[in-house]
Image (cartoon, rainbow, N blue to C red):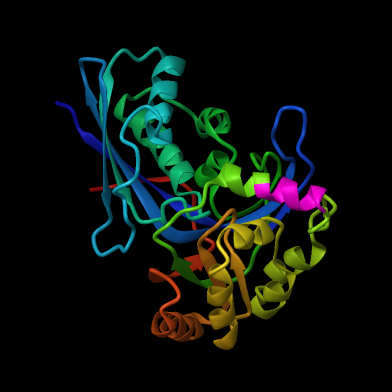
Amino acid sequence: MTRTVRAKAPAKVNLQLTVGPVAEDGFHPLVTVFQAVDLFETVEATARTDGRITLTVDAAAGSPVDASGVPVDESNLAWRAAELVASSYGIADGVDLRIVKGVPVAGGMAGGSADAAAALVACAEAWDVGATRGELARLAARLGSDVPFSLHGHTAMGVGRGDQLTPVMSHGQFHWVVATQAEGLSTPRVYAEYDRRIAAREQVQNDLAVEAPVMTALMAGDPVALGRAVINDLEGPALSLMPRLEKVLDVAEEAEACAAMVSGSGPTVVALARSRQHALAIAAHLKAARVADAVLTATGPTAGTVLVQD
């Protein structure tokens, strides 16, 4: 009998995202510090014998995430992950995939990468290929820059395209408020705007180095110090493309967030709180101001992709 295997993978927040000049291959070298937070994508995989792949997408129960625009064909990273596992291990069977989304779509929190990581783990288990975690990590790097971290989780430094990971020590928990927009931002478009701003000298090109204050704050478990240290080179380009995000940042700062910043390439804005209670207060302030389409709270760091038992 076939069985359904479930795997879940977390969203991420970039505590540091420093972007270098575009290279000859068209990609930007990065230095980034990721933290996984407890908003999850779940992928269900059910093996089938006819070699076909099918994909459906739903929003998680009670989640404000709008999954209606997510592709359900081979352009979806989860579909590509299934194909990659099959080709890598000589699998002729197919699979029915179902994504249950709990991470904002096109929101700069790596929801698509989390889908890919969860699909890798779920398909490897459903087809019983005997893949090691290291083998899956190598496949993850072939799918996208953020997929290895979605597999890894916790807190880590990424270099290169962000896929070369080193674990980072972190103490305690950090509490986040996540303010989402119904309209997404294209990551390639944000990078193109970054290049334009650098060429026009509207933005300074930062050195590709790890910010020591970020590491110190993580080791100390100090949200106030971390709030002073966070940096995102893509925030300016995201604000240029979607100026209304300035109001979200302003409202979070009015609520005395330790930091408020665009997450990754946006348009999601994340605010760092001093405590769980402070996060709830910031969330209430953002909801009352009606500057976001949905407001969630999350805690990090959390584990990477794991199988979910029935």
Residue at 31 percent across and 35 percent down: it is 72
Q: Position of residue 25 (x, y in %)?
A: 72, 27
Q: Image quadrant of residue 129?
A: top left
Percent coordinates x, y for residue 229 in the rendering? 74, 70
Task: Return the residue nearer the eye: 47 or 185.
Answer: 185
Image: 1 above or below 29: above
Looking at the image, which residue is at 85% across and 52% down? 207
Q: Can residue 31 be seen at all in this image of the molecule?
A: no
Q: Nearer the viewer, residue 265 or 77?
A: 265
Q: Residue furthest left?
A: 1
Residue displayed at 59% across by 57% down: 241
- Residue 61: x %, y % from top left: 23, 60
Could you say where residue 74 lies in the image, as x and y percent from the top left?
A: 37, 27
Looking at the rendering, which quadrant does residue 104 occupy? bottom left
Please give left or right for residue 207 compared with residue 100 in the image: right
Judging depth in this view, the residue of 220 and 40 nearest the camera is 40
Q: Is residue 127 visible?
A: yes
Q: Which residues are magenta?
A: 193-200
Q: Is residue 202 found left or right of 76 in the rendered image? A: right
